[in-house]
Image (spheres, rainbow, N blue to C red):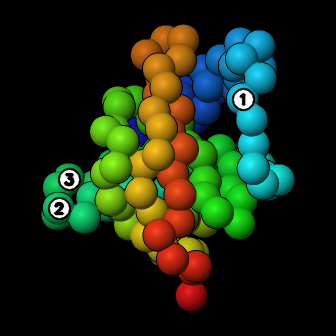
Amino acid sequence: MDDEARLREVARAAQRAEALEAQFHLRRKDERTPLNCVMLLLPADNGNPISAWAKDISPRGLGAFLDGPLPTGTLLTVDLRSMGKPEYTFEVRVVNCHTLAGGIHRIGMSLTAPPE
């Protein structure tokens, strides 16, 4: 299975998990706009790039689904893509990471500076 097919599978599993997540009544500071695209996470420590599925975006951050956990505090460069081409690139810090059904992880990231 190629990376994009796996990410779509991750997104489908994550959508099922969101119904369970609603029972926890997570509080939101900002209104979120749903996203549905592939993004690349580039660790600030020059680690290996991580493919993820973008869930939503707000004025202060974004949410995503991925196969593995990321430690809170991790600094990343986010590359939101459209048809394989970079669209937006900005810096974020991981603020939370939750394991969902099927071993999928939902991460919350806050912007470290406004996107240019």
In the rendering, at what x and y percent does residue 114 appear?
58, 79
Mark 3 touching mark 2, by CB under 8 A? no
Q: Tell me the residue that label 1 is attached to.
A: 26
Q: Quadrant of the N terminus?
A: top left
Mark nearest the camera among 3 and 2 is: 2
Residue at the location (75% across, 35% down)?
27
Label at residue 2:
none
In the rendering, at what x and y percent does residue 58 appear?
71, 59
Label at residue 45:
2
Asked if 31 appears above or below 2 in the picture, the reply is: below
User: How would you rate the neighbour count of disc 1 (Cα within 10 Å): few for under 14, some for 14-19, many for 20 or more?
Assistant: few
Residue at the location (35% across, 60% down)?
76
Asked if 11 appears above or below 91 in the picture, the reply is: above
Where disc 1 sits, the SS reads loop
User: How would you rate the neighbour count of disc 2 (Cα within 10 Å): few for under 14, some for 14-19, many for 20 or more?
Assistant: few
Task: Report the Cα–Cα distance between label 2 and label 1.
Answer: 30 Å
Q: How many marks?
A: 3
Label at residue 48:
3
Looking at the rendered structure, the kind of residue marked 2 is Asp
